């Protein structure tokens, strides 16, 4: 780590008291006060006002700590877009750290910063009010997530520095003489062993909570704080180990939830951030993903266009993410009609390892930036994770998985919305044409009706039968596709002699010029019963339907040269 000196100062050297915790999981070791970083000064006692000579008036007064200073945490990148280090700037002081440094918070006036290495984690607690380091802590484990309680107790989520095994959640008190304590044990099963996993820490008046997630399965564990008593609870989330991939067809809840965002066929322009600039290879991947989102939606979902100037969308290549996305490799956020898509830089350090984009590092374990950006564009148009609705879908159904697959796992380089994504977009925004296929993930009821050109006729006379096919009218269930007519489908006309219980004769009806209308012309010589049938198609998410039966009485006999009963065309 390169450190920058700012001015002269006296350093108070103190003895370092090392406290080791014996634990099978290689628990943390906490140091007392050690040498402070050279970029940001070490905190001293609260300054005393010496403007009035002592002894000639009231005693010197202690100055109140100043309010928190603005802090800026930024990544430094090389020419190819890979992380080479980080900087923390507070006022005129700057700390230069390596590529595996991090900052959490602030928690009140305190910012938790640190740097990971093969030997563990070196933590620094920054007092933003005084702009100095209030405490340093050495841990032989790796910290990925921290928070601070109101009493100053630090809570950290740890993984083993070598194996990356989960070590649970530990609390470190304000007294350096006290041993750290494991307050939440590690997760179990898939969540503990998955290569890609994340954890979210939360704090309430009564508990500390950790929620580990991997592959759509989550485990939540809590540490209760009630008076002097302590208790640990383990709660499996309701959607844990839920596999609904065999429950097709889907209807409710929607496998890929969608929420209101834009008007149909809105044009969403975007540009790249002026300072958080994406390297050329990332720009190419994001631009391709924008085209993928537009071309594969099969709906009237928004159209993405790259456009400089007054664009509502911003693409950032940055390590600075909102708190809701701290464990994500990419993130889409919005504020009314303003939206931002963030992509992490190459080399960002996660609890599961180093982030590598396949556009720069083609070995297994990398992530395809185009697919990841497509996922985020899906969030921009309103798609949520299927796990939110309790579904764990096959990669062929969606690109909106909570955890994006890495190379060479199935769907790692998918460059189009899946059928369940399209199903949600079609109901949210509508269809571009009445001939557009309804996504196969859906389960949409249809209604078909049949009418005739005459209520009775003479044998051998012309009879035109007309079928109308539409989606069932139910705006609460089908939203924008409710009640629309369906064109270019296969519709049958079935007939048999009136009063007969025998087999039906089947003919195929023709598409008419009017959308959703199908016709067939016959020259019946006897009285028949007719019905129109729309068989359930194999290639889209529509349910079949059959019309009511219609009887057309035929009188007399055909004289002279009678036309065939069948449609001559």
Image (cartoon, helix red, strand yellow):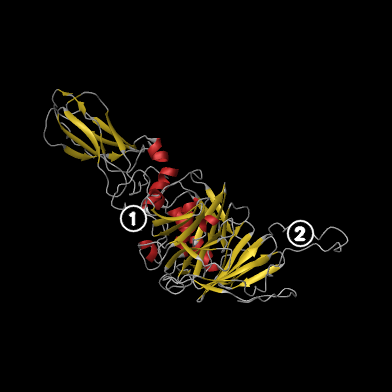
Label 2 and label 1: CA atoms lie apart by 56 Å
The residue at which mark 2 appears reads as 63
Q: Is residue 431 above or below residue 92?
A: above
Q: Nearer the viewer, residue 194 or 269?
A: 194
Q: Nearer the viewer, residue 349 or 131?
A: 131
Q: Residue furthest right?
A: 56
**Quadrant of the rendered image containing residue 430:** top left
Q: Nearer the viewer, residue 313 or 483?
A: 313
Residue 399 in view of the camera: no
Residue 198 in view of the camera: yes
Q: Locate residue 94, reporting x and y percent.
A: 67, 69
**Quadrant of the rendered image containing residue 416:** bottom left
Give the quarter of the figure containing the N terminus.
bottom right
Q: Nearer the viewer, residue 25 or 192?
A: 25
Classify 10 Å Cα crowding around label 2: few (below 14), some (14-19), many (20 and above): few
Relative placement, left or right, of 409 versus 429 is left
Classify 10 Å Cα crowding around label 1: few (below 14), some (14-19), many (20 and above): some
Secondary element under disc 1, as helix, strand or loop, is loop
Earlier in the chain: of badge 2 and badge 1, it is 2
Which mark is in front, 2 or 1?
Answer: 2
Residue drawn at the location 86% of the way across and 63% of the way down: 55
Residue drawn at the location 40% of the way across and 36% of the way down: 476
Residue drawn at the location 63% of the way across and 69% of the way down: 87
Q: Locate residue 98, reporting x and y percent.
A: 58, 73
Q: Locate residue 68, reporting x and y percent.
A: 68, 58
The residue at which mark 1 appears reads as 241
């Amino acid at each position: 780590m390169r450190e920058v000196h700012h001015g002269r100062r006296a350093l108070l050297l103190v003895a370092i008291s090392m406290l080791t915790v014996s634990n099978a999981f290689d628990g943390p070791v906490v140091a007392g006060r050690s040498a402070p970083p050279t970029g940001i000064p070490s905190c001293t006692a609260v300054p005393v006002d010496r403007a009035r000579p002592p002894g000639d008036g009231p005693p010197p007064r202690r100055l109140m700590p100043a309010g928190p200073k603005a802090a800026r945490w930024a990544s430094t990148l090389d020419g190819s877009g890979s992380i080479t280090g980080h900087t923390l700037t507070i006022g005129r002081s700057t700390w230069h750290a390596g590529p595996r440094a991090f900052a959490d918070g602030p928690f009140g006036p305190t910012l938790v910063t640190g740097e990971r290495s093969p030997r563990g984690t070196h933590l620094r607690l920054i007092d933003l009010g005084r702009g100095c380091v209030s405490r340093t802590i050495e841990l032989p484990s790796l910290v990925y997530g921290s928070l601070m309680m109101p009493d100053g107790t630090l809570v950290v989520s740890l993984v083993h520095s070598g194996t990356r095994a989960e070590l649970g959640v530990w609390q470190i008190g304000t007294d350096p003489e006290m041993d750290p304590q494991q307050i939440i044990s590690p997760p179990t099963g898939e969540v503990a062993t998955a290569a890609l996993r994340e954890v979210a820490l939360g704090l309430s008046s009564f508990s500390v909570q950790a929620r580990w997630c991997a592959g759509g399965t989550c485990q939540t564990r809590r540490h209760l704080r009630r008076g002097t008593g302590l208790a640990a609870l383990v709660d499996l989330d309701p959607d844990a180990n839920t596999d609904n991939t065999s429950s097709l067809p889907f209807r409710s809840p929607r496998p890929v939830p969608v929420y209101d965002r834009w008007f149909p066929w809105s044009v969403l322009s975007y540009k790249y951030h002026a300072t958080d600039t994406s390297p050329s290879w990332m720009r190419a991947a994001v631009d391709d993903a924008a085209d993928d989102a537009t071309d594969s939606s099969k709906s009237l979902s928004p159209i993405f266009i790259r456009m400089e100037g007054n664009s509502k969308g911003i693409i950032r290549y940055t390590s600075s993410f909102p708190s809701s996305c701290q464990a994500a490799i990419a993130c889409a956020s919005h504020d009314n009609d303003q939206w931002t898509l963030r992509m992490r830089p190459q080399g960002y350090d996660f609890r599961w390892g180093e982030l590598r984009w396949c556009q720069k590092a083609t070995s297994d374990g990398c992530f395809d930036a185009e697919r990841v950006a497509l996922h985020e564009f899906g969030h921009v148009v309103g798609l949520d994770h299927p796990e939110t609705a309790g579904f764990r879908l096959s990669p062929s159904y969606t690109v909106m998985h909570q955890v994006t697959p890495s190379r060479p796992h199935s769907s790692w380089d998918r460059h189009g919305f899946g059928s369940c994504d399209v199903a949600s977009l079609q109901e949210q925004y509508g269809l571009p044409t009445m001939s557009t296929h309804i996504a196969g993930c859906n389960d949409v009821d249809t209604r078909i009706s049949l009418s005739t050109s005459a209520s009775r006729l003479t044998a051998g006379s012309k009879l035109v039968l007309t079928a109308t096919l539409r989606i069932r009218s139910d705006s609460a269930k089908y939203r924008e596709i409710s009640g629309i007519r369906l064109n270019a489908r296969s519709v049958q006309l079935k007939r048999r002699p009136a009063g007969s219980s025998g087999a039906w004769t089947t003919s195929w009806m023709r598409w008419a010029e009017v959308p959703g209308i199908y016709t067939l012309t016959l020259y019946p010589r006897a009285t028949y019963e007719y019905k129109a049938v729309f068989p359930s198609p194999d290639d889209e998410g529509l349910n079949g339907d059959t019309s009511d039966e219609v009887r057309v009485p035929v009188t007399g006999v055909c004289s002279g040269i009678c036309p065939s009963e069948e449609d001559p065309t």
